[in-house]
Amino acid sequence: MREIEVSFISMQDSNLPGTELLKTVLEPLLEDFQYWFARSRNFLETEQLSFMSHQEQSDLLLRVKQAQAEVNTTKMLFTATDKQVGIDMTTLMPWHQLVTECWNVAMHFRQAQEN
C-alpha cells in the first residue's frame, strides 16, 4: 500500500474556514470514493469483460482494492481525529483518476452489451 499524506488542522477555533471546509467537502468526498470503489470492485469481480484481458481486469481490480483500503484507512483517521485531518491532493488525484478509469470501463461494457 502506498503512503497516504495527511495534514492536521488546529481545531482550537472551531469557526476556522478550513475546519468547516474539511467537514463539508472532505467527508462527502471520502464517502463518494468508498461508494464508487465498492461498486467498481463488485462490477470487476462479477463481470467478464470481453474487451480486456483477464490480466488487465485483475490488475484493475487489484488497484481498486488497494485504493479502497487507502480510502477506508483515511476515513478512519479522519473520524478518529474528530475531522481534523486534511488529505494531500497527491493522494486524492490517483483515486479520482482510478474512479474515472472505472467509469470508462463500465461505459465501454454497457456499449458492448448494446451491440
Image: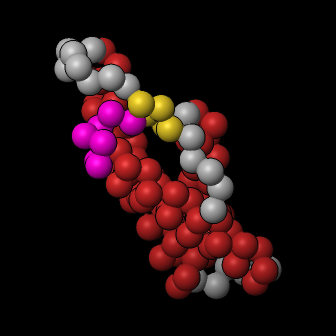
Asked whether residue 107 appears in the rendered view, the answer is no
Q: Give percent across and percent down for residue 5.
A: 57, 40
Q: Give percent across and percent down for residue 44.
A: 58, 76
Q: Taking 73 as reference, is 86 above or below it?
A: above
Q: Taking 26 as reference, is 15 above or below it?
A: above
Q: Residue at x 65, y 55 (%)?
A: 2
Q: Give percent across and percent down for residue 51.
A: 76, 74
Q: Taking 35 as reference, is 80 above or below it?
A: above
| Picture quadrant where residue 1 is located | bottom right
Q: Residue at x 29, y 49 (%)?
A: 80
Which of 59 and 53 lies nearest the eye of the viewer?
59
Which of 71 and 81 lies nearest the eye of the viewer?
81
For the record, the magenta segment spans 79-85
Asked whether residue 95 appears in the rendered view, the answer is yes
Which of 21 and 11 lies nearest the eye of the viewer?
11
Q: Is residue 16 magenta?
A: no
Q: Residue at x 63, y 73 (%)?
A: 61
